[in-house]
Image (cartoon, helix red, strand yellow):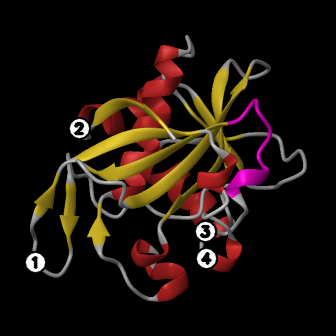
Amino acid sequence: MITFKVDELLPCLKEVATGDIFNTEVVQLKRKSVLSKYNSKSGWYVNWAKFDASVEIYALVLKGTFNVQGLIAVQNNDDCQSLEMKWACVSPENNIWKYGKKKFAGVGGHLFAIAADLSIKKGYDGFLTGEAADEELFNYYIEEFGAAPLPPINNPFRIMFSDKATERIRREYTYEWTDDVL
């Protein structure tokens, strides 16, 4: 489920209050003890520890910290020859839609770029599938990023991003992949 709009295309994160720029890293999360901290009660929509082993979860963090700014869960989708974004959400402190505040701009775009990079690494050429949280987001991604609607199996807001649709995002964002797995 994609729960945000891409607010700005930025290579790094920008602190909204100051305009300061922060570099980022990507950390894979596997430990249930770590993932259990991210749940609906703490403002993360779902219990991230409940995903099965076939789903990979990655955190976008401020470089050199474990200050999580967004999470994305992905899974191979062999039927569509793409990587499926199972869940993608910004942290509660960046969720202006749900909590009326945003500390950093650029988090959502980073999450898409991470998924697109993983799609390439897994042999899917940058193709992504996912489900928008609502009709407004569904239409936004079609209009702004060239996503294509998919047949509405279990969700009327299923979409696919082609390699061309994700190329713009992949080119814009910079972050480092860490070898850390928490």
- Quarter of the view holding residue 25: top left
Viewer-side label of 3, 2: 3
State the mark number for residue 1.
none
Please tell me whether mark 4 or mark 2 is closer to you in this view: 4
The residue under label 4 is: 42
Image point (23%, 48%), residue name: 64
As drawn, the residue found furthest toward the top would be: 123
Q: From mark 3 to mark 2, how far is it between C-alphas?
A: 24 Å
Instruction: Determine which residue is flagged by label 3.
Output: 44
In terms of secondary structure, what is the magenta stretch mainly?
A: loop
Q: Secondary structure at mark 2?
A: loop
| Residue 18 image label | 1
Q: What amino acid is labelled 4 in the image?
A: Ser
Mark 4: secondary structure: helix
Q: Amino acid at mark 3?
A: Trp
Residue lying at 57% horizontally and 16% vertically, measured from the top left: 124
